[in-house]
Image (tube, rainbow, N blue to C red):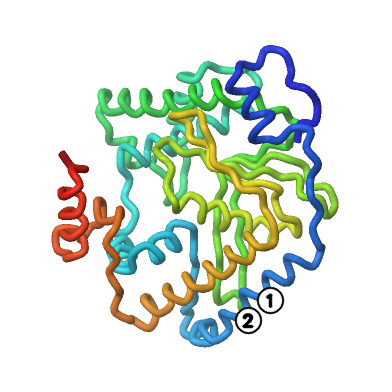
Amino acid sequence: MPTSSPPLGLNPAQQQVLAGLMAAGETRPEFDPMLPARLVDLLEDRLAETAGRLGGDGIDITAAKTMLGQVHQCERWFLAEQREGFTWSPKTAAGTVAHKAIELSVFCRDAPAPMDLVDRAVERLIDAGGSWGPREYLSGWAEAEVADLRSDACDRVTKFLECFPPLKPQWRPVLESRTTVQLCDGRITLKGKVDLALGRRDGNRATVLLVDFKSGAAHRSHVDDLRYYALLDTIRSGVPPFRVASYYLDSARWHHEDVDEDLLEAAAHRVVEGVIKLVELTVDKRPPTMTAGTACAYCPERNDCDGARQWADQRAALGLDA
């Protein structure tokens, strides 16, 4: 991570990121090298009974950030999303293109303009093989639809390039970094993918910054997502990140938390509670509970749910849908 004064040529937004978010020049904390092992013990001890019901007939559980967020927010919403399965939309496709373009902006040597980065990203995603990705979705688009996507993605990429200082090689930037943690003899798997990791590992000193980029408004779930990333990164690497942050491209603002043992233990307890719910709902077939809230606006079952109607009535009474 940077430790010197801001280089010449940075605009005010980039200088704020360097000094405020990256905390250039600040002392980094050290952690007990046994902390990751204690976190694994906490997770496996509390999940032992649940894991004991898995493993037979090839049944296991893989939990990711989105699944845990959904099951904690509303169990009926989680099951509805599981039945629907993931489908591409203009919003998710534009986000994927923008993330790929940002990745290319860091590693391309010819410093292409934002629109060129977006075009390269679209080409790479269409040309890529494999079962996952927006290849088939994008390939069937009309020219006008592709133009809208390019415009949306270009907006996000431009905001990143305008607001973040150029990422130096010595900062060890890693984009779209995936982490997998296996628990209880592989019967439970935790997965995560953080948008940006910055920093070089240095013994037991926490030197890495994890950043998730957001194009919309702040939400409480973003805090839980960041803590989840911190937990997985700590177990994987053996040292916690020093800070985790959500960076909001539309406002050039961020929310961050400095990582400590209390934060990591809280994240571990949330994972345990979430995994138990996942197993109860998907393996034991326990009927889901319903919790009215913001998820009602886009739940697949919102037209046939008392919770969604309650949420709509509450918003109407407050004049929020006027």
Residue 10 lies, with reference to residue 156, above or below; the image says above
Return the residue nearer the eye: 138 or 221. Answer: 221
Name the spot of residue 306 as percent of width and height, x first.
16, 65
On the image, which quarter does residue 137 sit in?
Answer: top left
Residue 109 lies, with reference to residue 305, above or below; the image says above
User: On the rendered image, what quadrant is the C terminus found in?
Assistant: top left
Name the spot of residue 240 as percent of width and height, x first.
71, 55
Q: How many marks?
A: 2
Q: Residue at x 64, y 35 (%)?
A: 21
The answer to whether residue 123 is visible is no
Amino acid type shown at disc 2: Asp
Residue 8 relative to residue 297: left or right? right
Mark 2 secondary-structure assignment? helix
Q: Residue at x 34, y 36 (%)?
A: 138
Alpha-carbon neighbours of circle 2 within 10 Å: few (<14), some, or many (≥20)? some
Mark 1 secondary-structure assignment? helix
Q: Are marks 1 and 2 in contact (CB under 8 Å)?
A: yes
Name the spot of residue 170 as percent of width and height, x first.
77, 32
Residue 53 lies, with reference to residue 100, above or below; the image says below
Q: Residue at x 75, y 59 (%)?
A: 238
Circle number at residue 45: 2
User: On the rendered image, what quadrant is the N terminus found in?
Assistant: top right
Residue 230 relative to residue 322: left or right? right
Residue bearing mark 1:
41
**Alpha carbon separation for disc pair 1 and 2:** 6 Å
Circle number at residue 193: none
Q: Residue at x 55, y 55 (%)?
A: 192
The answer to whether residue 2 is visible is yes
Alpha-carbon neighbours of circle 1 within 10 Å: few (<14), some, or many (≥20)? some
Return the residue nearer the eye: 229 or 261. Answer: 261
Residue 44 relative to residue 96: left or right? right
Amino acid type shown at disc 1: Asp
